[in-house]
Every structure is written in C-alpha cells, then in structure tokens.
Amino acid sequence: MNTWVMSVYRCLMCFSPQVILVQVNPGEAFTIRREDGQFQCITGPAQVPMMSPNGSVPPIYVPPGYVSQIIEENGVRRVLVLPQQPEFHPGGHSPLHHAPPPPHAHLPAFMPHPAMLPPPPHLYTGMAGGVGDMSSQYIPQYHPAHIYSEQDSHSPHGRPPQFVHRDERASKTYERLQKKLKERQGGERGGGGGGGVQMKDSPPPSPQKSRSSPPSMDSIYNGVVGGGKGLEAELGQGQTSTTAKQTGGEKEPGGKCNRCEMASYPETPLIPSCVTLQVTDIQARGAVLSWVAPSRAEGEGVSPSLEPLSYDVSISYSGKDGKYTSVYSALCLSLSRVLAVCTGQSLRGSPSEAVAFTTRSCEPDPPCPPRKASGSKSSTLVLQWKAPCDNGSKIHNYTLQWDEGKGTGGYEQCYYGPQKQYRVTKLSPASRYSFRLAAKNDMGVSEFSETVNLYTSCSVPSPPLPPELVKAGVTWLCLTWQRPSTSPKEDDIFYSLEMDEDEGYGFQPSYDGDELSCTVKNLHRSTKYKFRVAAYNTEGKSNPSQVAEFTTCPDRPGGPCRPVIRGRVLPNSFRLAWEPPKDNGGAEVTKYVVEISEGLSGVSWELAYSGPAMEHVCEGLKPGHSYQTRVYCMSEGGQSPLSETLQVQTPAVPPGQCQPPRVVGKPKAREVQLRWGPPCVGGGSPVSVYSVEVCGSGPQGSTGQEEVREVYQGSEVDCTVGSLLPGRTYSFRLRAANKAGYGPLSEHCEVTMGPGAPEPCKAPRITCKSPTVAVVSWETPACNGAVVSEYRVEWGAAEGTMQVCYSGASLTHEVKGLLPATNYFCRVQAVNVAGVGLFSEAVLCQTPPSVPAAVSSVHEEVDGPPTPPLYSPSTCLAVGWEPPCDHGAEISSYLIDLGERQSISVGPVTKYIIQHLQPDTSYRIRIQALNSLGSGPFSHTFKLKTKPLPPQPPRLECTAFSHQTLRLKWGDGPAKATPSDALQYQLQMEDKRGRFVSLYRGPCHTHKVQRLNESTSYMFRIQAFNEAGQGPFSTVYTFTTPRSPPAPIKVERVEDMSSVCEVSWEPLLPMKGDPIIYTVQSMMGNSEYKQVYKGSATSYQMPGLQPNSEYRFRVCAIRQCQDAPELSGPYSPTVTLSPQRSELSAGSVSSVGPRAGADPARPLTDEQWAALIIMLCAVISILIAFIIQYFVIK
C-alpha cells in the first residue's frame, strides 16, 4: 500500500490541473488551509470541489482520530475522511518535540499521519459556526515516530538471523526471549498503542532489535530527514498504510472497496520496467526509498488506460534469492532486499534489481520487571531479572530504581551495574516496595520496565485461637481454626495441628499446611482426643493454642447372633430367643427388633417385636407354613446389621371335613362318576390323598345291608366307581389326607343306580339233525331291572370269526347249510332297553361226516413226469387235480370219466397219466372222489387235447472244411431262420470221453465248428423238436479235418555279389514229423516267374545275372506228407534286386517289414482304392462344412 501511495503521489506531480472532490461523511469534519493562509473547518455530510493547479492534493487537516484517503473515480479524485483505528508501535519511543518545519519550496505541505501523533489537549476553538480560523500555534507539531514490526530485526553483525550459529542453550534462551517479546508486544497492541503491519511470509524475528538513536536536529531540515526526501516518503507511507488498514473491510459510497487490491499480473510486462532503487537516510527503524518514473517509449504499445501508474515495493528478509513480500508500512528491517514493480490497472511491469541495506543499532528494548527470588526474608528482598533485546549493541549496565517504600511515585536508584540480581537489605517486615529496571548499551538507555510491587515477610505470628469442631464421625473429626488477627494478609502463614490420644506419647502432629481446616482420620470410635494448633511462617513458629477436647461418635453395634428356637414348634406359634451382639459399637443396646416373613422369598417383612427383651413368642401363625425371622439391635451409634435369617416350619395338621361328593351326570347301571372339592381347612399341608367309601344296599325296598368298602384312593378330585349293580342304592362318603393324616369323613351321599344290561346267558345247547343242519337252544338270564327284548346268536367256524346268525325273542334257532365233519362255535347274547348284555361262553359243535366234496380244480401237467419211459405227449395226457374235502371220511379212490371211453378208477392220488390216446385229439374229462360213506359229486368237465407226433431228424452234411473248421448243414431251409419257425434243431458232437455234447440249439440249418485239430475225425448227430416234443436222434455222422499247409516265409535279405545273387530266408520247423522243403522262383523284368531252386536249404545263390536287369524273387515252403501229396504254403512277398544300382528298392535289401521289396509299380487293390475314395470324400465334406460355417452362418 506504501507503493500505491507513492505511485499516486508521483503521478499527480506530472498531471495538469484537476478537480479534487473532498467527501465528508455525516458527523465528521476536516480542515484545509486556503490561499490566504487561513484555516477552514467543514462538517459533513458534504462534497467540496477543489482545484489543484499542479495536479497535487492541497494540504488537508483532519481532526484527531481521523485519517484522509484519496480515491480516483471517472477522472475525479475524492478525499475521504474516515475514523482512525489504532496501530501497533512496539518501539514505544517518547515523542520528540520539535517546531514544525516550513513546507518545502516545491512540495505541498502534508500533515503528519495522525497515527504518529498523540492526541493534543485541545485542537479546535470557536467551531460552533461550522467554519472558523485557527492559528498555527494550535496545530501540534511533532516529529513523526518511526514504525517498525517484529520482522524488522537483524543480528548485531548485520547478517540474517538464520545464519547466526547458536548452541542448544543459546537456542532455548532465544526461544524464551522471543516468547516474552511477543507477549509484551501483544499487551501493547491490546492497550491501544500504535502497531506495524505483520508480514505473513517473513522469517522469524531476531532476539535483538537494531535501532539507532533519534535523529539529531542537524539531520532535520525543512521537515525532511536526510536530504529532504525522507519525511515526505515516510509521511506518505504512514498515511497510505493506515488508510489501507482502516478501510480494509469498508466500501465507499459508490460501492467500490477502498482496500488496495493485490491483483495477479501476467508474466509478460506490458508497461515499462522500473529503474534501479536508491536507499538513503538509513536509520535504526527506517529508510528512504526513491526511484525515477519509467520512461514511455512510443514503440512499446502501452495503452493510455495504464495511467496513472502505481508502484509495488516488495521486501525480503532472507537474502537476494529469498521470498519477497509486499509491504505497506514504514521500513523496520535488519538485512533486507527490496524490489519495486510498476503496475497500472490490470497490467504489471517486471521488478527492478534487488537493493540490499542494513539498519543501524539503537538503545535496548525495555526489560521485563524484576522478580522476587528465593532467600527473601522480613528485612531482605532478593531481586532477579533477565536481559532484554540489545538491538545490535551489547548491554553494559542495568539501572534499578525503587520508591523506598514511600508510595509517593518518586524513585531513587538503588543499584547500577552489569549484574542481573541484587539483594536489598535493611527493609521493614510486611512492607510493600516498588521497583523498576532499565538497560544501557553504547547507543543509550532503554525505557524503564513496568513497575512491580514486592512485599517483605512478616514477623513470627501470634498464637491462634483453639480449633473448633465442625463435624464428628466414627473414625474422623473435622476441625477448623482461624488466622491470627495480628498477621497481615500478605504474610504466608502455615499451621501445625497436634493431637493427643492419651496414650502417654503426648501431642503428635497430625496436619501441617496453609489450610484453615482439617479432617483427622483413622481415629477410634467413641474416644476423646485433645487438639491444639500453632501458626508459623518464614520467621518462626508461634506458641500453640489452648487445648480443645473432642470425642468421636460411637459406631453402630454389630449384628446379633442368629436367633434360635426355644421349646417345641407348635402349629400356630413358636418361641424365639437370641444373644446380644458381640460388639456394641461403644454404646449400650437400647432395643431389639424382630422381623418375620412368611414364605422363603423374604420379599415382605413384618415387625413382630421391638423392645429390650432377648426372647419373644411369635403367635398367630399358620400350620404347615414356612417362616423366616431375623433380629437387629439399635443403640446411640445407629442400627446394627441384620442377623442371619432363621427358617422355621410350623407342623401341619390333618385337613378338615370335606363336603359330600356329588354325582356328575346321570348314574349308569354299573358305574357312577363322582366329583368333590378340597376341604375348607387344609391343615398347613397340601392334600395328597382322597378316600371314597361306599356302603351298598339291596334292591329297592329291601332292608339288607352290606359292608363298607373303599372304592377310590388318589389325589384327583373326581373318580368313576364301577362294579356296581344296576337298580341298587349306594351311600358314598369322602375324607382327605395330608402328611399329618386323614381328616374326618364327610356326610353321606345317596345314589340309586339305573337299570343295566342283562346278565350273560348260560352256555347254549346244540343238537345236529344231519351233517348240514343243527338246532341251538338257551335259557333266559337275569334281566337287571329290565325285561329281555332280544337274543343274538353268533355262529362261526372259529371263535374270532363268529357272525350273528339269529336275532329275535325266541329261545331256539335252527342253523342250516353246514359242512359235514366240521367244528363250529356258538354263543348267545341278551338285550334289553338298558343295553346289551355280555355273550355267553362259546360252545364247540362238530357235524357228522359225509361223502367227499366235488373236485374243484382239474388241470394238465405241463411238464410231463419222467415216468413211465414210454410217455409221449402225442398219445398220453398227464392230469392233476386238487384233493377235495373228505367230509370226515378219508378218500379211498378217484374215478376219471373220459366220456365215450370207459371210466378209469385210480387210487388216492392227485396225478395220473392217461395212455393209449390218439394224437392231436380233444377229450372231455371229469373226476369224482369216493370214501367209505359213498361217492361224491363229479367235478366240472375239463377239455384237454393231445399233441401231434414229434418231427424226424434231418440229414447232416459237411459243406466246407479246413484244417481247423468244419461247416455243417442240415435240412432244406435257409441258413438263417426266422424267430417264428416252430421247428428247431439240436446238434451234438462226441467228446474224448465218448459223450455227446450239445454244440448248437436253434432254428438255423447251418453251423460252423471251430478250433479243431488237423487230420482228425469227429462224430456228430442231430435231433429235431417242436411243440409236439423232441424227435429221435439221427445216425452218427463222421467228418475228418485235412492237413495244415506251411506258414508264409519271410525273406531276410537279398545280397548282390557282382554276377551272383544270394537269397536267404527264415527256416520253418517240421510239422508233426513231416519235413519242410523250400521253392525259390525268380522273374527277370516283366517275364513270368520261373522256379530256380527246390530243396531244404534256407539260402540260394543265383548265378548268371545279366547287367542292367531287374530281378524279383519269392520263396514258398512245401510240407512233404508221408501218406499224402505235398502241401504248398503261400509265397513270401516279392523282393526286387537291381544290379546296376547295387541296392534294393524300398525295403528290398535287409528289409524285414511285410512290404519289404514290394513292387513300386504294383497297381492298387480294390480295398486301397475304396480307402482312398473315402478319405477324399471326408476331406471334401470338411471343407464344405467349413465354408458353410464361415460364409453362411456367420
């Protein structure tokens, strides 16, 4: 902001006359000097137009507490008068009083910044009329104070603080000094002193401030320090800085913010750069910066909107290459580097070259007040202090002044020297003394520190008053005492409390401190203690106070012993006794309290007794109930704990009388259901058993009595009494019982039973009239009060399967349709209106025997019996049947009726073969059983048919044979028969043991026998069979296998020996004693094969080979049979020899494979052609599928 003010100022000097508008807010005023030299005061609100002949601002005088600010808007400058805010001035210099210098010859006169000047006692006189004149003697004239901040310090040697080497101790001292300096400056800032601008990015301050002494009168000329420019620049800087801070958050009437905005500018400058800075008049806390306005070349393309230009001054505290920060306050720096930037509206020029300078040293900072150190007494004070910042010059001496305890404000020097502590002696006790301190170096004497008041100690305190009791406890006493009245408040007094326990040790200390109260703990209950208190300070200890006696409170007594039972526990009461507590707590027990609780839960307790006695009778209890009792006692110390709980169980008594039982529902004929309630008096124990007694009487109207008997005993409250007689009257009584016994019987309950079902009938009588008819008769049973209305007869062959065969009022019944010689069971039941009676006993009855029953099932035996040997299904029928019931007489024989033929009688069998029948003929058969009583009825007629005659065996022939197989054929049918053929064949061959073994069974007409031996005879026979049965075997046929030819030979090698060729092959073993010979055939070119050798050797040399000719060889083995012609085996594969190349074709020489020496020009066989065609078709199919997949589907 200083840069902006200075930039505006220099631009105004170059401009032509302009109009200045001075805006005064409501309630504010400002003063100007007119051309005639008079002063004029204008009050707001107002806007005063003023003409500046040379473009500069005329001198404007503002009242104390206000500042002026110049704002340009639309070519018009405005001067705003705003209230002033306090600034921070850590320097604290006293203002230097000088006469105001006259204005410079070519510069307008400016008032010093109001922040630099203390308010005058009076400024205005005669301002009632709004405009008045004041003489120049009423305008205070002061030399402006230099402004500095914490960041402007430097080391005594002119180097930045970061380069100063410090050890650990020095670093800690530096940190403490920095902390105190900040605290002091913060206090000054809060107290309304002037302030500097804190710079955010500046390095930490140095512990020493370099300041120079105030400028002498010789350096002040015409209000300008050091050459005539320092005052002007300094005043401009102070004014601009204050204005920027005061208007930082405010806005002018036009809505624009008065704060100077630090906008970001483009890196490429569009306006001329600044020239080199010049630093002059360097002081301890300030310096004057100056520069020349940049030249404006015509070719630079600068826009007229850049006018007026402003300047930005940046400062660095860490060297030339350090970080630069814009500053808006007066310079107060140690080693700094400054840059100036020329800016205009949104354009920014390049910075100037950095300029380094060092401020001068000055007097030390005001030291901190001295403090009171240890060793001070009533007549002595020991003072200590710390060294302040020396500001570049070493401190030599300290000046300590005091007021000698007079308090008049006058101070005298009591010490002068380099030490940092001093002992002041011969002082009055308990007195106040004021001290202040100043430091001195080569540059001068610092200001005095703040005044500090210190006090001396007092004399020995007087004896205090005896201690007083605040509150007493069982093991503690809370005591308090008062401060001695003669001791001043400033004196630190401590107290010592002593206690005597009457144990012969006297008073012992129990407390030592500065409090006026104490709680003494760990004491004995109900015990008297003596106390006294003494006061002491640094001068000594007073006499103890008078003795005070206090007694601790008694403790509550201990719990009584567990109560016990005296005597026998009755159902309604018991006597309780207890012992006193072992520890009464230091006081006598005044009373005992007995509490009782019903049940074992212990939730609710009732007071049973309260008094001094140690036994009590608890009455009004319930029999069979559990009770808990406990005791506690009370004394002056309070209530004791509860004793242990005693559980008491009162004995139970038998329950009271029950109400008579009542009948549930309507009484039945033989049972009645009774129900009752529990007794009104339970006796203290739950009812466990109920007992019901019955006393029966005879029929209604009779006087006979029966004995009493118990019909129920249990825990339920209802029961069903059975086994009673219908129509009788019974008397029932009830009683309840618990663990104490049975209670009394209840009143009688008379119950008359209803009518019942009849009594069971006696066993019925059965008489058989015939094997199929029986007559049953019975007697009338007892009716049980109701006439029998119906009888039911059950009849059956077994007791569990009897069914009702008669129901009616008659006493007889005839049963028909019975089986002879069969056991039957019979029983009878009577029914009346009351119900159905029980059945009588079951009676067994057996009917007499009879002729057999009819044969129920006749069938043909499918699998004919193995005997007789001449059985044939074409002329015989095997018949079987199930034996019928013999009806009590054993069956002696069966009669088989064949219709037109004579009947056949057989013995007691169930199977029979009927012979000598006609083939393929139907017969009607029925069978009749006979026993000793006669013949039974015939069975139903069954139709059976004989089978046709079986087929004859066919002729067996051998159609093909080899040394291991024989192919046999029979009949004239096809080789493969259909499954529908009814005629089948069985082929058998004789084995080594002479037995015929089945080789084939089926409908085919051919069969190949394999795995046979060569030159061996085999015997066969054949049989035909169909549904009629198996036909006879044919005659035995004999077939012989031929001899086996030799196996193929493998040529091992063909070797060319110039004009001779040698062929060798593998030998074969003799076959069953027959020797083996070999035949070699040769072919030259495309001629025919010719035999060139026959013999038993395994190699052959062929001479006379023609050159340039190709030879082919093959070998065959021949078996020489003794009694048969020779048998030739197959030829070996052809091998080729080319004498010209002296080598064999593929595989011809030394080749062992099956295709060794094969003819390369040999045509393909049919099988090879078929395989080749199949492979080509497969490849074409794959290609077509791929094309369809790729081009069609995708």
Image (cartoon, grey):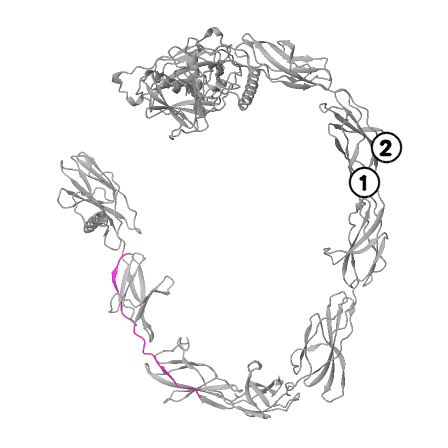
Residue lying farthest front? 129
Where residue 411 appears, x then y in whole percent?
A: 64, 13
Is 730 on the left or on the right of 96, as rendered? right
Q: Report the front residue among 211 and 664.
A: 211
Magenta-highlighted residues:
938-963
In this picture, is 208 found above or below 712?
above
Count the numbered circles shown.
Answer: 2
Q: Give whichever of 1095, 1127 is nearer the camera.
A: 1127
Name which residue type carries label 1. Cys
Does the image show residue 1168? no
Is 219 displayed left or right of 349 in the figure? right
Magenta span contains residue 588: no
Asked which secondary structure carries label 1, the reply is loop
State the mark number for residue 502: 2
The picture places residue 1019, in percent across and down from the top left corner, at: 32, 64
Would you name the residue on which mark 1 appears? Answer: 553
In the image, residue 608 sits, relative to residue 277, either above or below, namely: below
| Picture quadrant where residue 280 is located | top left
How far apart in space, not on screen, are marks 2 and 1 (Cα)?
17 Å
* Quadrant assignment for the N terminus: top left
